Amino acid sequence: MKFGVVSHTTDYTINPVELGKELMCRGLQALFVPEHSHIPVKRETPWTGLSHADQAATDDPMFLPDWYENALDPFISLAAAATASPGLVVGTGVALAAQRHAISFAKAVSSLEAVIGPDRFICGVAAGWNVEEMRHHGVAEKQRWRALYETVEAAIRIWTSEEAEYHGTVVDFDPIRSFPKPATRPHPPVLFGGHSRATLDRIVAVGDGWMPVVGRGARPTIDDVEAGIAFLASRSESAGRTFITTVLDVRVDPATIERYRDMGVDRFLFGGPPLPRDEMLRNLDTWADAAARLGA
């Protein structure tokens, strides 16, 4: 099992270039970056990462850490980090593809790969949780999973065809030509976030793997992850491809991580808030030590 780190990148925390270098020198082989284009001033959607401890510490049910509104564009951060650290694997963890137009999303991925080369990018995608943010991008809450599915399916068509067209419920465009194609052929692996059966069905239909986030809420549990991996394995032969799983779990617990390894998780991502340089380096030391003890 491989290891990496997922963290927002901002203009006031450790720079993504330095973060990538520090990961590499500690033997943590991958950097994944989430995405938020903005945070609406008026918001009714509570943060899904608000733990019981967070709730006890604040009287504001709409509390949201300020790194969300300060988040850098993930494709810019990843291009910078990968260019400065040859051998570093980078990924979106996750890109809110439903909030991007399919043509622009496809171009962003292809452009990143043109800069950093093949087999270095993992495209994690999800629909997102912030309903008001979605609306600003023209996506209704009830349409977000359909928008995600169609955006990914349309992007794959653009990546793999000289001329591509797509006519869906949300995404619709006549034949286009868009180059370059991804350096990874036929395209970089696309991993879906989420934990429902519908998410697993989307993976079987158009995806290459799964990216569940564990430990932030009641679901998914580690048992859910094991069951999901077994489900994907049972569909592998009929789908004609092997599905990979990258897990983000906020717990640095050797027994938990060992269980992920034993159930066939491809990569485990340590995660935490974006921090100033010295604080982040202390976290990296802790995570690298945990990975080393597990034989990374």
Image (cartoon, helix red, strand yellow):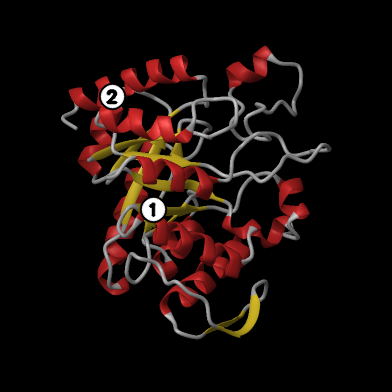
From the viewer's perspective, is residue 15 above or below residue 202? above
Q: Nearer the viewer, residue 184 or 35?
A: 184
Residue occupying image coordinates x 59% and y 70%: 103
Percent x, y for residue 62? 75, 29
- Residue that numbered label 2 is attached to: 288
In the visual, does 43 lie left or right of 169? right
* Image quadrant in which you'd find residue 65: top right
Percent x, y for residue 66? 67, 27
Label 1, residues with CA under 10 Å away: few <14, some 14-19, many ≥20:
many
Q: Nearer the viewer, residue 220 or 184?
A: 184
- Residue that numbered label 1 is attached to: 122
Q: Nearer the viewer, residue 149 or 68?
A: 68
Percent x, y for residue 125? 50, 54
Percent x, y for residue 97? 57, 57
What quarter of the picture does the C terminus occupy?
top left
In the visual, does 76 lie left or right of 240? right
* Image quadrant in which you'd find residue 56: top right
Task: Please tell me which of labels 2 and 1 falls first in the chain.
Answer: 1
What quarter of the picture does the N terminus occupy?
top left
